[in-house]
Image (cartoon, helix red, strand yellow):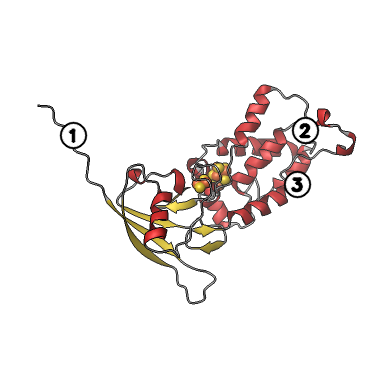
Amino acid sequence: MNRIPLRPAARTLQIQVLRHNPHDPASEPHLQTFEVEEADTMTLFIALSEIRERQDPSLQFDFVCRAGICGSCGIIINGRPGLACRTLTKDLPDRITLAPLPAFELIGDLSVNTGKWMRGMSERLETWVHSRNLENLDIDTVEQAMEPELAEQLYELERCIECGCCVAACGTAQMRQDFVGAVGLNQITRFQLDPRDERTDAEFYELVGDESGVFGCMTLLGCEDMCPKELPLATQIAFLRRRMVCSG
Ligand code: SF4
Ligand code: F3S
Ligand code: FES
C-alpha cells in the first residue's frame, strides 16, 4: 500500500529581536524573544509582521516592496546582513536572532536610516551624469546610441537597490565613518564607464582616490558575499583601484 508522506510538523520559531529606542533616554538595548508558528513559504518579513500584528505593535522594522526591490528591509540575521522579505524561515534554524544594520543611524529596533547615509554618499560622490555643455545639447545628442555591451554593463551596476548590506558587512565601513563603501565605489565605476559623463579620471580620483574611497578597501570581500543582488563588488573595486593608480 502506498503511504502518503506526512508533512513535517510546523516549527515554533524563537525569534530574538534586539530592541532599542534611541529617542527614549530610559530605553536600554535588550533582546526580546517572540514565538511564531512557522507557515509554508514564510519569510522573515511575514514573521515580523505577525509579531507586530498579534504580539507587539511597537516593534519597528522597515519594508516597502516585499519583493527585494526597494532595499528597505535589510537587517542582521543570525549575524549576517540580508533582506527580511527575501529570507525564508525554512532556511534558518529554530532560533533566529535579528539586529539592525550597523553603520547606519538607528531609528528604533530593526529600523535604520539607510536613506540618509545613501543620500550623503550620493551628494558627496555626485552620482549623476556630469556634462559640461548641457545648455547646448538637444535631447537626441544627450541620448546618443550606446554599444549594447556597455549598456548591459551599466545596467548590471544599476541593479543596486541601496539596501546597505554591503556597508553592514564591511569592516572598513565599521571603522571609518567617511568610507563610501562598496555601494559608493560601485556608483563611481558606473559613472566612470558612462561615456555621457565628461568627468576626467583625475576628477574621479579627487572623489575616491584616498582612504575614504578606493584605498580604504582592505579586500575583506564581505560586501560581495552579502550583496542580495549578487553584484561583483570586489571585482569592480579592483578595476577602479587599477584605474585610480594609473590616473593618480
Ligand atoms: Fe545592497 Fe548590493 Fe547595493 Fe550594497 S551593492 S547596497 S549590498 S544591492
Ligand atoms: Fe569592505 Fe568590500 Fe572592501 S567588504 S573592505 S568594501 S572588499
Ligand atoms: Fe523592499 Fe524587502 S521590502 S527589499
Image quadrant where one finds the C terminus: top right
Which mark is nearer the camera, 3 or 1? 1
**How far apart are the two marked residues, 2 and 1, measured between alpha carbons?**
60 Å
Q: Is the CB–ligand 1 distance for label 2 below 8 Å?
A: no
Residue type at numbered disc 3: Glu
Up/down of 186 relative to 93, above or below: above
Residue type at numbered disc 2: Arg
Q: Quadrant of residue 176?
A: bottom right
Determine the secondary structure under disc 1: loop
Q: How many marks?
A: 3
- Horizontal side of residue 122 vs 218, given as left or right: right
The residue labelled by disc 1 is: 5
The residue labelled by disc 3 is: 206
Of residues 97 and 176, the one drawn nearer to the viewer in this rendering: 97
Which mark is first along the chain, 3 or 2? 2
Residue shown at 45% from the left, 43% from the top: 86
Residue shown at 66% from the left, 41% from the top: 187
Instruction: Measuring from the top left, give residue 43's x and y in whole percent.
Output: 40, 46
Residue type at numbered disc 1: Pro
Instruction: Measuring from the top left, give residue 240's x and y in whole percent.
Output: 66, 37
Determine the secondary structure under disc 2: loop
Residue shown at 63% from the left, 40% from the top: 186
Instruction: Measuring from the top left, give residue 237's x and y in whole percent.
Output: 61, 39
The residue labelled by disc 2 is: 196
Q: Quadrant of ligand 1?
A: top right
Up/down of 133 relative to 66, above or below: above
- Horizontal side of residue 230 vs 144, given as left or right: left
